[in-house]
Image (cartoon, grey):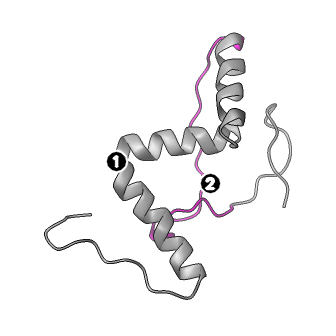
Amino acid sequence: MSRIDSNGEGTAFARSTGLPSHMGKATAELKTKVPECVKDEFAMLAHGMGLNESELLRSLVMVRLYGVEKTARMHSDQLRLAAGLSPEQAPTGVVG
């Protein structure tokens, strides 16, 4: 599997993002332009967290849209399915 480098070159393949399959493959892009110094600081932040820039940006977007708990539950459910376990059930009275 090839990855797209920071210049946008390379072949992009859909890959697991830790998100539920009903959301579809992670093939859509979000883009913006920032000053070079901002990109450099964002890259340092991501790498300091053990992530690449795409992983950090994806996490930021998902948490802002769905909240920390629901996003964490999505990741947890995928891991549980990979381990052969059923997804966790939301607590009674909690809407996911």
**Which element is circle 2 on?**
loop
Quarter residue 4 falls in: top right
Residue 48 higher or lower than 17, as above or below? above
**Which element is circle 1 on?**
loop
Q: Residue at x 65, y 28 (%)?
A: 45
Q: Residue at x 69, y 60 (%)?
A: 14
Examine the structure image and report whether residue 22 is included in the region drawn in magenta: yes
Q: Which residue is mark 1?
A: 67
Q: CA distance from mark 2 to mark 1?
A: 22 Å
Examine the structure image and report whether residue 60 is included in the region drawn in magenta: no
Q: Which mark is residue 27?
A: 2
Q: Residue at x 36, y 44 (%)?
A: 65
Of marks 2 and 1, the one in the foreground: 1
Taken as a whole, is the magenta stretch helix, strand or loop?
loop
Q: Which mark is residue 88?
A: none
Q: Is residue 77 left or right of residue 83?
A: left
Q: Amino acid at mark 1?
A: Gly
Q: Find residue 66 and report its horizontal and vertical position in percent.
A: 35, 50
Q: Earlier in the sequence, mark 2 or mark 1?
A: 2
Residue 50 higher or lower than 79, as above or below? above
Q: Amino acid at mark 2?
A: Thr
- Quadrant showing the C terminus: bottom left
What residue range appears in magenta? 15-36
Q: How many numbered discs?
A: 2
Q: Find residue 1 and report its horizontal and vertical position in percent.
A: 84, 61
